[in-house]
Image (tube, rainbow, N blue to C red):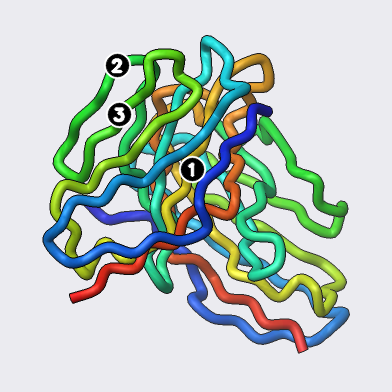
Amino acid sequence: DAKTTQPNSMESNEEEPVHLPCNHSTISGTDYIHWYRQLPSQGPEYVIHGLTSNVNNRMASLAIAEDRKSSTLILHRATLRDAAVYYCILRGGSSNTGKLIFGQGTTLQVKP
Amino acid sequence: KAGVTQTPRYLIKTRGQQVTLSCSPISGHRSVSWYQQTPGQGLQFLFEYFSETQRNKGNFPGRFSGRQFSNSRSEMNVSTLELGDSALYLCASSLRDARGLNEKLFFGSGTQLSVL
């Protein structure tokens, strides 16, 4: 399975934008980029996903590099509730099995 | 619409015992997956079921088993518990086949299992 690399931790101030990077240099042409987050004491929560084009939803935006070797999850105005571990996950390719492969993720701290 | 429900929320067992965890997926969802989360290993895939059939299994010993019923509810069982089985066990459901690349997984809050 193609691997993703994320920073271990990031900090943000409340109400400021947050850009969470993810590198996936071995991504294949059929891999989708998914983001999940896990708030304390909860299961992971779907955030957003995309293939080639940038995507927006009510929670966040996903910016995908033209060569698809990296992507950025954008939280437009961080709130204290956004403090969580964010996971960037590739789905698809030759080993598509339906399982999500979680790395260590990025722990986001939001300061008031 | 109710989310994914896992019971019990907390469980304490002793070594050698067995345990059964339950997962009720979102109504209408047909796929259920199970994950184990520990501080050392993070989130690891256990198995996935679709329409009562196990489609995929992670790298866990045979002591870990599961099944899915006709109403899509799922159970997982761990026999001969070991201390290392202490973990948060998470269940996720999806509307269709979890192998769908656009498919979103919806997770429950998990069952925290402690083995003493």
Q: Where is residue A61 in the image (x, y as percent from the top left)?
A: 23, 36
In the rendered image of this protein, does residue B103 appear above or below residue A43?
above
What's the amino acid at mark 2?
A: Ser
Q: On the rendered structure, is A7 left or right of B56?
A: left
Say which residue appears at 68% left-offset and 35% top-offset. Answer: B54
In the rendered image of this protein, does residue A74 appear above or below residue B75?
above
What's the amino acid at mark 1?
A: Ser
Q: For mark 2, what is the residue?
A: A53
Which quadrant of the figure contains the C terminus of chain B?
A: bottom right
Crowd class of label 1 (few under 14; some 14 to 19; many from 20; radius 10 Å): many
Q: Earlier in the sequence, mark 3 or mark 2?
A: 2
Q: Are marks 1 and 3 on the same chain?
A: no
Q: For mark 1, what is the residue?
A: B72
Q: Position of residue A19 (x, y in %)?
A: 30, 45
Circles 1 and 2, Cβ within 8 Å, touching? The answer is no
Crowd class of label 3 (few under 14; some 14 to 19; many from 20; radius 10 Å): many
Looking at the rendering, which quadrant does residue A28 occupy? Answer: top right
How many marks on residues?
Answer: 3
Q: For mark 3, what is the residue?
A: A63
Which secondary structure, mark 1? loop
Q: Mark 2 lies on which chain?
A: A
Q: Which chain carries label 1?
A: B
Q: Which chain carries label 3?
A: A
Q: State the separation of the CA atoms marked 1 and 2.
A: 34 Å
Using the rendered image of the protein, determine whether residue B71 is visible from the camera's viewpoint: no
Q: State the separation of the CA atoms marked 3 and 2.
A: 8 Å
Which residue reaches farthest top?
A29
| Front position in the image: B64 or A62 | A62
